[in-house]
Amino acid sequence: MTKNDGITIRGASATDRDFVLTMADRLVSFDVPAFRSKSELAEGDRRALAAWFERLQDDSPARAQSAAADEALFVAEVEGQLAGCAYLVTLVDYFNERPHAHLSVLAVTAAAEGKGVGSALLDRSEAWARERGSDRLTLSALVTNDRARGLYERRGFAGEYIRYVLPLKT
């Protein structure tokens, strides 16, 4: 558990499930690309987060332990109130084929915006990456999410490439 400026960051538990799953809606609180819907994006993140909780409940200790080594879910609290979450996974870099930490989800409640919760979750995410020997922490942000991109750039993240999408009419 990490405490910083009244913000507590801790590993998520089964009791955090409902809160974390509702945070998927916060991940689309901005204009999205025209060829995506907010519900499509939120449901994709919700599926990934729900799968983490399912692995947490898995009857197989070996599977649960293996998943725990490759991913993490943290929640933030401000004055005892849940205020955000960060979900990390381990990916393999396409170019150098080394595993690295990837921040898949970072979400903060509307009430906690601007209070340092996102930065505290980023600090914990970076620490998790370092603890595992990662040489980098990656994340993805939609080009339309200016607020998140601004935070990431202020924190030292830099763009590496842009994924282009051509929706094909069927």
Image: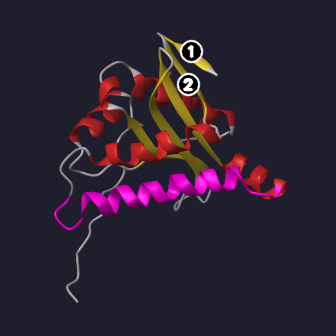
Residue 28 drawn in magenta: no
Kind of residue indicated by mark 2: Ile
User: Up-down: is 76 above or below 159?
Assistant: above
Label 1 sits on residue: 3
Label 2 sits on residue: 9
| Residue at figure coordinates x 50%, y 27% from the top left | 76
Q: Where in the figure is residue 93, as x and y percent of width and height? A: 55, 57
User: Is 100 on the left or on the right of 32, as rendered?
Assistant: right
Spatial CA distance of label 2 from label 1 is 6 Å
How would you rate the neighbour count of disc 2 (Cα within 10 Å): few for under 14, some for 14-19, many for 20 or more?
Answer: many
Q: Where in the figure is residue 129, as x and y percent of width and height? A: 60, 37
Tell me the element at label 1: strand
Depth check: give the residue in front, 63 or 159.
Answer: 63
Residue 57 drawn in magenta: yes
User: Up-down: is 98 above or below 72?
Assistant: below
Residue at the outermost bottom position: 170
Observer able to see residue 92: no
Q: Where in the figure is residue 162, as x and y percent of width and height? A: 30, 57
Depth check: give the residue in front, 84 or 69.
Answer: 84
User: Is 156 on the left or on the right of 31, as rendered?
Assistant: right
- Identify the magenta region: 33-60
Q: Main secondary structure of the magenta part?
A: helix
Depth check: give the residue in front, 24 or 5.
Answer: 24
User: Is 80 on the left or on the right of 72, as rendered?
Assistant: left
Looking at the image, is mark 2 or mark 1 earlier in the sequence?
A: 1
Depth check: give the residue in front, 110 or 142.
Answer: 110
The tag on residue 81 is: none
| Residue at figure coordinates x 31%, y 25% from the top left | 111
User: Is 150 on the left or on the right of 98, as rendered?
Assistant: left
Kind of residue indicated by mark 1: Lys
Observer able to see residue 152: yes
| Residue at figure coordinates x 24%, y 36% from the top left | 147
